[in-house]
Amino acid sequence: MSLPSTVDHIGWIERDSEAFAVSLATTPLDARVPGCPDWSLRDLAWHLGNVQRFWARIVRVGADVQPEFPDEQAPPDALDVAWMRDSTAALLDALRTTDPGTSAWVWWRDDRTVGAIARHQVQEAAVHRWDAQSAAGRPAPIAPEVADDGVDEFVWLSRQLREPTPIELVATDSGRSFPVSDSRPAVTVSGSASDLVLLCYRRVPASAVTVDGDAAVLDAFLQPIG
């Protein structure tokens, strides 16, 4: 069971999205993104911008209605910082004008609300901000409160979407522990909350954290779902 999030969702989406936009303005768009090796920075911006526009539309529906998914398109050469900031503005406006308790379509099972969308979009902005800064070789860690909540959310989603996995994640900076199942852990993974959430999203290797126990269990857990 995930604990209620106390993170300022709108504030952190705005901060990390703006840091992402700054990276677009200061880094060549054809720079490769280490955490997404098939993507350039342009591809990453196209992805995050479309994600934010998509969820803005979902929020504005005001009900749990299956959306139509647009066909995937290649990023335009003219993609720029203004387009990215407009994408963020659309999401922020939708979230600011909609009650967090409003029902909404989501891809997970439990907590089908606008508030849950806002919570997940904090992580989208934070991890992709880290990606964008990595393309320039200067990634700043994810802010402690955002990272701590990100680990909690990742475990909460994993409990809904995966078979129970005997893993415990331990954030050494906050002191919080995050059991992925109710079973005794076969492996305990310790590190800063930032490193843990980046590990969960396969941005950093297991060597970035401390792994105590069956590393094969962790490797299996980190494989993409489906």
Image (tube, rainbow, N blue to C red):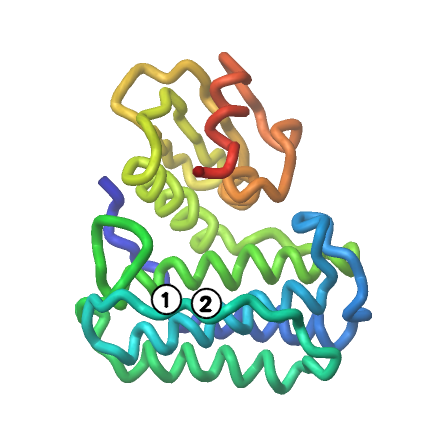
Q: Residue at x 31, y 42 (%)?
A: 156
Q: Residue at x 42, y 43 (%)?
A: 151
Which label number is shown at residue 195?
none
Closer to us: 46 or 89: 46
Closer to us: 35 or 134: 35
Residue 170 image offset from top left, x and y in percent? 44, 31
- Badge 1: how crowded within 10 Å, few (<14), some, or many (20+)? few
- Report the side of 102 relative to 210 (left or right): left
Mark 1 touching mark 2, by CB under 8 A? Answer: yes
Q: Locate the N terminus by quadrant.
A: top left
* Type of amino acid under label 2: Trp
Residue 176 image offset from top left, x and y in percent? 37, 36
* Type of amino acid under label 1: Asp
Of helix, strand and loop, which one carries label 2?
helix
User: In this rendering, is residue 1 above or below 129?
Assistant: above
User: In this rendering, is residue 34 above or below 19?
Assistant: above
Of helix, strand and loop, which one carries label 1?
loop
Residue extending farthest to the front is: 71
When asked about the image quadrant of residue 6, the answer is: bottom left
Q: Residue at x 65, y 70 (%)?
A: 74
Residue 128 image offset from top left, x and y in percent? 58, 59
Q: Which residue is mark 1?
A: 8
Q: Residue at x 29, y 80 (%)?
A: 60
Q: Locate the C terminus by quadrant.
A: top left
Task: Measure how far apart labels 1 and 2 are at the Cα level.
Answer: 6 Å
Which label number is shown at residue 12?
2
Residue 39 image offset from top left, x and y in percent? 70, 57
Q: How many marks?
A: 2
Closer to us: 213 or 35: 35
